[in-house]
Image (spheres, coloured by chain):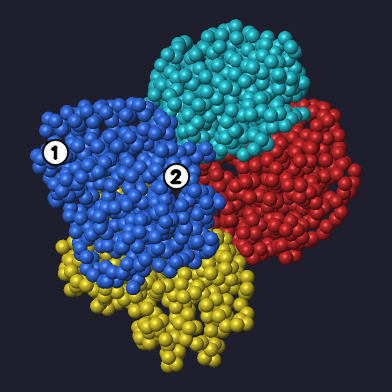
Chain colours: A yellow, B blue, C cyan, D red
Amino acid sequence: MTATTATSMQAFQTHSGMPAADTEAALAERYRQVRARSTALATPLSAEDAMVQSMADASPAKWHLAHTTWFFEQFVLGARAGYRPVNADWHYLFNSYYQSVGPMHARPQRGLLTRPSLAEVLAYREEVDSRMARAFEAGDFDGPLQQAILLGTHHEQQHQELLLTDIKHALWCNPLRPAYRDDLAGTTGEATPQRWIEFDEAIHVLGAEPWPAHETFAYDNESPRHRALVPAHALASRPVSNGEYRAFIDDGGYRNPALWMSEGWARVQTEGWCAPLYWEDDLERHFTLAGMGAIDPHAPVCHLSYYEADAYARWVGARLPTEAEWESAAAALLVEGGLADDAVLQPRAASDGPGLRQMFGDVWEWTSTAYGPYPGFRPLPGSLGEYNGKFMCGQWVLRGGSCVTPRDHIRASYRNFFYPPDRWQFSGLRLARDM
Amino acid sequence: MTATTATSMQAFQTHSGMPAADTEAALAERYRQVRARSTALATPLSAEDAMVQSMADASPAKWHLAHTTWFFEQFVLGARAGYRPVNADWHYLFNSYYQSVGPMHARPQRGLLTRPSLAEVLAYREEVDSRMARAFEAGDFDGPLQQAILLGTHHEQQHQELLLTDIKHALWCNPLRPAYRDDLAGTTGEATPQRWIEFDEAIHVLGAEPWPAHETFAYDNESPRHRALVPAHALASRPVSNGEYRAFIDDGGYRNPALWMSEGWARVQTEGWCAPLYWEDDLERHFTLAGMGAIDPHAPVCHLSYYEADAYARWVGARLPTEAEWESAAAALLVEGGLADDAVLQPRAASDGPGLRQMFGDVWEWTSTAYGPYPGFRPLPGSLGEYNGKFMCGQWVLRGGSCVTPRDHIRASYRNFFYPPDRWQFSGLRLARDM
Amino acid sequence: MTATTATSMQAFQTHSGMPAADTEAALAERYRQVRARSTALATPLSAEDAMVQSMADASPAKWHLAHTTWFFEQFVLGARAGYRPVNADWHYLFNSYYQSVGPMHARPQRGLLTRPSLAEVLAYREEVDSRMARAFEAGDFDGPLQQAILLGTHHEQQHQELLLTDIKHALWCNPLRPAYRDDLAGTTGEATPQRWIEFDEAIHVLGAEPWPAHETFAYDNESPRHRALVPAHALASRPVSNGEYRAFIDDGGYRNPALWMSEGWARVQTEGWCAPLYWEDDLERHFTLAGMGAIDPHAPVCHLSYYEADAYARWVGARLPTEAEWESAAAALLVEGGLADDAVLQPRAASDGPGLRQMFGDVWEWTSTAYGPYPGFRPLPGSLGEYNGKFMCGQWVLRGGSCVTPRDHIRASYRNFFYPPDRWQFSGLRLARDM
Amino acid sequence: MTATTATSMQAFQTHSGMPAADTEAALAERYRQVRARSTALATPLSAEDAMVQSMADASPAKWHLAHTTWFFEQFVLGARAGYRPVNADWHYLFNSYYQSVGPMHARPQRGLLTRPSLAEVLAYREEVDSRMARAFEAGDFDGPLQQAILLGTHHEQQHQELLLTDIKHALWCNPLRPAYRDDLAGTTGEATPQRWIEFDEAIHVLGAEPWPAHETFAYDNESPRHRALVPAHALASRPVSNGEYRAFIDDGGYRNPALWMSEGWARVQTEGWCAPLYWEDDLERHFTLAGMGAIDPHAPVCHLSYYEADAYARWVGARLPTEAEWESAAAALLVEGGLADDAVLQPRAASDGPGLRQMFGDVWEWTSTAYGPYPGFRPLPGSLGEYNGKFMCGQWVLRGGSCVTPRDHIRASYRNFFYPPDRWQFSGLRLARDM
């Protein structure tokens, strides 16, 4: 994904709510590039790697490849009368959670699908891409279908990130600790000092204009734009680093219940947590997509649950930011930071500079905000309305993207969400405090 | 609990943050009355009834009686050097979750404590009450201890409500469906039409002044006072009734996944929910603290999980209110409604009248707000800081009290919180909608 | 239970298969005595003690008292047309597992039955005993009913033992470790040396004649008499003692997988077993029905699972006896040993003497025989056929009775059976070896 | 596996206890053939098929291929000082349950091993086979190592059967129901009438002479030879057929608790069993290694748990045979029946004829005998002693081999064992009755 690509996407997005004739080419190009990147991500994987499912929350790479393809068949190609699916049997296998379009294969059983093979799934991708290309050329897509395509590309980018987080977990489960790729860049830098950036109380207008009523793409959960009163507060200039988190561990952070939410403490006990996920017991080495390596004390700490992020903040006398605090600070910033396009796939120390650093990329930042609807929230109509709304209970908002997020997929209003105990995402934290 | 009592409490509370000499008598009187009411609540129970624990979330009545007493021994009497506990062995048994004061008996095992007997626990209460009375007379309590006592009485009132919700569940588990009391008043009325009360966007100052820095008692989770922007919205004039909820059931509400949060739908499937807790399959009769009885279609629907409240609201094209919407509307209202003092112990239809009805009492109202800290939240110092803060993850706020809440325990800023699947509290809903 | 009693039972049993007119009085007397003993066993228990259920495998004392009474109502009084039950609602509550007579209250929920109260259950016992007494006087019982009564008394004696094992477990779950009785005899003696008694290969006729076709009572699982080839072997003269078992622990027995059945080793790991049930970590004290006390190294080791008994035998280079080895050796012996009639309720060291000691009483002896049907086994007809046969899978045979078994309930052909991980029975072992 | 092969094995086995110089060649040949057959079994599998693990009890085909190879490295090649393993890291991965040779990868996680790849495992097999071949040529194997090799080939044959049963289960879990092979022979015949063959009471000498003390190979659990009294009884001339079992289903067999062991009935309820494993709901079609197909009413019923076999026998008024009854009848018979060598991999109807039919092959026959040690049982010394003995608790004996058992692996004294609820083996039943 080159800078040129990012630009072309940018261009497309400026007009993409209701793509006019001249943006159809951009949409086709975006489709082509996103689809190609998914396939590229699977290149380092053997057929066996692509099939493994190491926990119910994760999915096999092969499933990600097939499900994202099914999405276009189901919601784009299949929306037209008389469409003959590439393989009618696969509908059941590759639906994820769209109750309104029929039953689905049980999620924890996705790792049992030896057939179709990886080769067949890749051929399935090619066939769907061909059909899509032919339809693009024929100008077959009306406005609603173009919107579904655009949504499908963003959906696929989410699965690209999940493919990486899921395969990282699966490879780590293998006692041999094999690397996903041996050729990843591994630069490191000096952590800059953490400074506090202060913000006065203010009413901000947050969120994105609803898409597709407005042109720029955003998920339904980012809308509508709404006014919010953000109290006076300060944000840390950068995420918490491995070295800082190490001090929390050394101070007995994992043994002191006073630092933890009640549910978090219970989890510490039952799971035996004593460090971030993927850290070795020596607290010196951890598992990465490049295999085992030394923990860089300057890089942002990563693979924390919400409970750990929250406990760390309490230990240091601070707190997590709310999502309104985060977004109001991020709204004016450029999307800069360690992102998937860099082919590092591991968080790195920020370069120094004024103001907020690394708001985007490197690690998702846990906020203290429970994931819920904005005032006036309306889900997308039809089956696609199942995309976000029905998960608005029990999860917490993370912001800013990570080192495995595509650059043209993240934005200031983007809301990611996971359950408080989840650790396998590239999740870290930035501190906040009251003023 | 008579009107006189309520008044004297009111008098006390006006000055109770740092009780002056003249309020000590009011504190002693409040202590006496709250303690007496707990014992009175246990009167209809046999020793066997008082021991039963029907699920891990519930506790035996005997445990409630002992734990609330232990609270005064631990945090008031025991705060003074050289204190000899009534029974040193019981500390371990009756600590609930205060990690900082030592280990505790496992919660799901509370129903195994055949000893001490109910008689011994009642004697324990009397002994502690005697010691407290002597200390009150001797003027032994300084300001911090007076605060701990006041907190202890509010703590005990919470357990009074839990004692009733827990024994209701336990008696219902018995196929004989025995009543808690045979002498409960059972009036019924016509449900008034539901109207919408509209509110413009406004900045409200919500929450309570922090206690004990300020005089009036409030839990730490109600503070600090803070400004919040509440968007334009409308609130229903009264809670949803049994009859209205029955229409949701009849319309297939429990069989339509599109109406449910994803986690709620999973729960519907695994638990086989098809009506509120305590309803019989015929949807005509339900279990109450007075035994089995006909469901009054005019009374507020009760014993709903958050998922059910949320699904009903979606079905009817509305939503749950936020806690800011609820509190800003309730702040100016008198505490009126069906409360525990009425000895009905079952929600009743509201009398008609202008404006919002039944904001207090009858049923706790689920809000759409995840339970979390207010901006600038500070837990109480020391062990009592474990009271509320550590539960601020994964639970949802309910507001307004119920038919088993003591009248002088509830207020507009009061925040109750339970997990989304919980149904054994007297929990219902009031509708809201965007404007 | 005095010697006189035992004798009168003996007298009765000699003729009891089809009791003639002159044995009806003996049956009535046996009924009276067995029933009285159950009530006596409950005397030390409070209503709360009588309600507790500490695990799914155990039942509350109150349930034992009610269920054994229900047995007579269901299978004796209720067998006559027009019978009006004492309380029709209780049928569902107090059926244990007789699928053929209707549904039943879920076993793990028995501890939730606060009603009927202990007092009501005791009154229920009295009422049924009165009805039984009147019917005995009126000569209302024909042969089949007399057989059901006799079976019912043996059934009740089994529940007497379970009442004691279950309350022991429940009281132990209370951190206060209260005693069941404070007045139990606590004698101790020197353990006699263990000798080996040798037996040549022989064909033995084992088992009991089928009852009621034959007069003497035996459970269906003890029949028919059948020939078995018992190979040459040796039996230890007495059960393994606490002191001997302590040597196994000190030698790392619980840490050496080579000594254990695969399932046993898994259980050691998951349950953290490192000593017999009820032993304290110091290996010096244990919990008994008389409360906490010193472990007598000379007394038989007790509260072992099958896995532990088997591992101990392997460690010492021996094995468990088969049930044929045990029965062929026991057949000629008198029923002598520490039994429930002695009011010690704890195993004691055997007195010295020639031959096999303590084959009866003190501890049930795990055999290496999986519980199954004898050749030609026929269950009792009708509902009573559910008594034993349907459990003939997955359990292991124990022989000889224990210190909580009534003397007139045990015999050489008696087969007890529990699951290999079960430890809450008074279960120990006697060694055997090949020759 | 041709007839020639079987003969050469036969020849080998006659002298194999302590193979003399002239049998070394036979051993090398047996090694070569067994090893080649494992690889052949994996030929129809993709790398993905070879990795799947559909339940904790099953293992991936790749794991079977690697583990059986590890066995020769660990116990044969590695027994010689200075041996350098092919890959030292794999020891941990491919140990199954030999606690005495070190820790092992958790069984339920075997399906997570994407690396080593199938190709690497096949290369590992080749490398070990080369090393073995060189050592054979060099005459490096002394008597004990020759014994370990012989044991290893039998061990591998067991895993060949498991590879087939495990992949059958895994492919069935895929909603596409793919076939393992498309080229399997599918003959069918008329079921012969079931006759009863009667046997008088007799003392039989059962079991095998202990190997390697005696020449002919047998597992330690088949020894020692011992005398057993077998009562008079009758055996059915052939296994129960699908058609006969269908009558049991049609008669409500799965809905009548009176027919079931208590544990079996619980399993019927919790698992929703209403037909043998792999049968479709229509009772007309089932899944086989050749894919979906019609159920042949004449073929032996298969994939039954012990509970189902036992319940069927009770329904028809018969019982399961004991293993002594089975073995005493089989001892004089030739090993004839549908075996893995036939490349059908599905049970077939027996041809008619006098006496007992299909005692070998087609379906394993559940006996009523709990798996335990024979009188005088001694496990093999050292780590290999973990092979059988530690599983002698909680499992039931099956006899006779199945359609996926190699012909030269089965014999009259062979004891297979599984847990009562297990259904994924090719397990059926033959009826017995008392006389």
**Which residue is under mark 1?**
B24
> Image quarter for residue A417?
bottom left
Q: Residues within 10 Å of mark 2 (few under 14, many from 20)?
A: many
* Secondary structure at numbered mark 1: helix
Q: Who comes first in sequence, dot 2 or dot 1?
A: 1
Q: Residues within 10 Å of mark 1 (few under 14, many from 20)?
A: many
Q: Is residue C379 left or right of residue B359?
A: right
- The single residue placed furthest to the right in the displayed view is D354
In the rendered image, the vertical position of residue D259 relative to residue B249, given as above or below: above
Residue contact at pointers 2 and 1, CB within 8 angstroms: no
Q: Nearer the viewer, residue B163 or D347?
A: B163
In the rendered image, the vertical position of residue D118 relative to residue A342, given as above or below: above
Residue B288 is labelled as 2
Across and down, in percent, residue D5 comes to 77, 53
Across and down, in percent, residue C312 comes to 53, 27
Q: What quarter of the picture does the N terminus of chain C occupy?
A: top right
